[in-house]
Amino acid sequence: MFKWASWFGSSDTEKEIVSPNGRNKCTVIIKSGQIFYKVERDNKPLINVSKLGFLISGEPELGQNLKAVRLVSRNHDEEFEMLWGEDKIIKNQYRETAIYLNESKDPRRIFTIRFRVFNDAVAFRYEIPPQPKFQQISVADELTQFNIDLNTIAWKIPAYQPDRYEYNYEKTSVYDLVHSVHTPLTMKTPNGYYVSIHEAALYNYGSMTIKLSEDKKLKADITPLSDGTKAHLSLPFETPWRLIMIADSAIELTTNRVMYCLNDPPKHDFSWVKTIKFIGIWWAMYVGEWTWAPGERHGATTAHTKEYIDAAIRLGVSGVLIEGWNDGWEGDWLENGVNNSFTKSTPDFDLPEVARYAHAKGIEIVGHHETVGFVDNYEKQLEDAYNFYAANNVHYIKTGYAGSQILIHGRREYHHSQVGVNHYQKTVELAARKHICLDIHEPIKGTGIERTWPNLLSREGARGQEYEGGAISPSHACYLPYTRLLSGGMDYTVGILDLANSVKRMSTTLTRQIAYFITIYSGMVMAADRPYIYEERFPDLIKFIRDVPTDFEKTVPLAGEVGEYYVVARKAKNGDWYIGGVTDETARRVNIGLHFLDDGAYFAEIYSDSDDAHYRDNQFGHNISTRNVSKNESIDIYMAPGGGFAIRLSQSK
Ligand code: NOJ
């Protein structure tokens, strides 16, 4: 227990908060009126003494002349259920201390910093109550530091760049993080621990990026608004949680679920939300067979959509996405998108008719809104656009915000700025009211809000397979589980089997495309190739695509290293297990002990690279085999360069 006497009203003091298992220790330090924290694991340093506080426009720094006037500590231990996802049950166990701070000099403002120390994370947030003369504030800078050893390895993607989140990861050291990078920022400390800095519950505030400040300390860099401030706030305000995920190994990090613990349970009934696997009128445009814009080769016609609906039934998937169905794609769609209509179809597309056709056959339509970042144009039509889909029984929409910035309130702003965050949130809440699920491309990053808003089923929000054909290397999908996917699921547009087509040559083997259904979780999964490719060229893979679920009971991370390889097992809600693996340019053999299975015999269907497969010159080499296994056995499997594998294990009846 803390010592009240030494804390109350004192200006120099320390308070230790220790995780339930005793391994993580966060020490909060007040020294010379400033507040700091540090984090240790097993008594070894993870985050060295780091400053906390804010610069508020037109005000003295909030973080000086502080006194702790009250401390409230408590323990928390519960399990909660996610409606859908990678793990149904999440353990939420932490020790919390809230530190109430007063300035001892004018303007005598007050605020609180709440710390939670988990067995696998440390998190804290600022809570600022309204107070006389301190009610509407503009944040000029958040001073939060994450002062980690400069020799720590970091895997980064750059922030504030034209392609938003869609970059290849690069291995570097903290010493080199002089330009802002996105979170989750995954790192390996010199003492061998894995740490990922991220945030949870991002509402009404700029997204946190991270950079090395001039005094060589990692620091929060909140995405600015075009007026240069970071956020305009009305008090009371709670910042997003600053989250430091901690693990002993890279693979252990991949199932860190603390982000969800730091978000609220749903406040409404979301029992109508269902994850979905679908095909899409999409890749045919990328490979030049069809076009987004109307014309001879227009993709999104009524006739094509009906063909896709029929194909969805044959393939055993539940939905069809339709891109390019609306007014605005003619000419330079990136320029002209400012006038896109979200209710007016092209003459050759009849939404009520395809919706009727789909509904009669039990297939869901996945609608599409490409805003091209023209948010003002989109917001004007938002209510009508969602009503149009809702009236036609459309329960899923993929939205997109192509372009380097968004146009909102008449200004060019970052997608990840406070106004961007608020726009995305508006779409999620409106969609929830209309019983519509969203998959957002060019989104605000995930911060676990899908616990509260489960209709936000997925985001693209990282370099996805549309970059294939030169801009993706086999290591990319081996970075994602340790970096981007710590922020939630991703629509990677998986299952593109026409690997060697001349327009978009894939940097994978065939079975790796199947592995993605397991290694890259998404609540909305597009089997992205054209149906005729599945049916005419790869009929032996359709069964797997049909069987693999989009919602799991639990996830067991098995093996891997950041950017090198990743092997994971997931239990489906019907009791079947799926195991997937991907490797970078290096061939690997893995031996998978099946100890996680339940008792009894399982029938294994194994899709693996052939011994001579290679992502460059023998992409299609693969084997499909079956055998009976039990939990006492193991499966030895080979992954070719740029390859992967998928296994389905079903309980023998
Ligand atoms: C850009 C996106 O990256 C792509 O996936 C989408 O098909 C087009 N915008 C059109 O919406």
Image (cartoon, grey):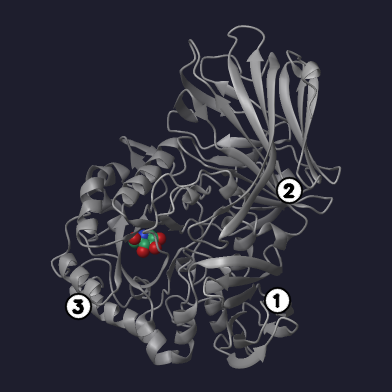
Residue nearest the observer in this picture, 362 or 580: 362
Q: Are marks 3 and 1 in contact (CB under 8 Å)?
A: no
Q: Amino acid at mark 3?
A: Ala
Q: Quadrant of the N terminus?
A: top right
Q: Position of residue 157 (x, y in %)?
A: 59, 52
Q: Position of residue 488 (x, y in %)?
A: 54, 56
Location of ligand 1 given as a quarter of the image: bottom left
* Residue appearing at x 66%, y 67% in the figure: 556
Q: Upstream in the sequence, badge 3 or badge 2?
A: 2
The answer to whether residue 627 is seen in the rendering is yes
Q: Amino acid at mark 1?
A: Thr
The yes-or-no answer for disc 2 within 8 Å of ligand 1 is no
Which label belongs to residue 303?
Answer: 3
Q: Amino acid at mark 2?
A: Asn
**Whether residue 627 is situated above or below residue 308 in the rendered picture:** below
Residue at the top extreme, as displayed: 106
Residue at numbered disc 2: 119
* Residue appearing at x 74%, y 15% in the figure: 8
* Residue appearing at x 60%, y 88% in the figure: 603
Closer to the eye: label 1 or 2: 2
Give residue 200's quadrant in the image.
top right
Residue at the left extreme, as displayed: 347
**Whether residue 220 is situated above or below residue 558 in the rendered picture:** above
Q: Position of residue 399 (x, y in %)?
A: 35, 56
Residue nearest the observer in this picture, 336 or 99: 99
Residue at numbered disc 1: 586
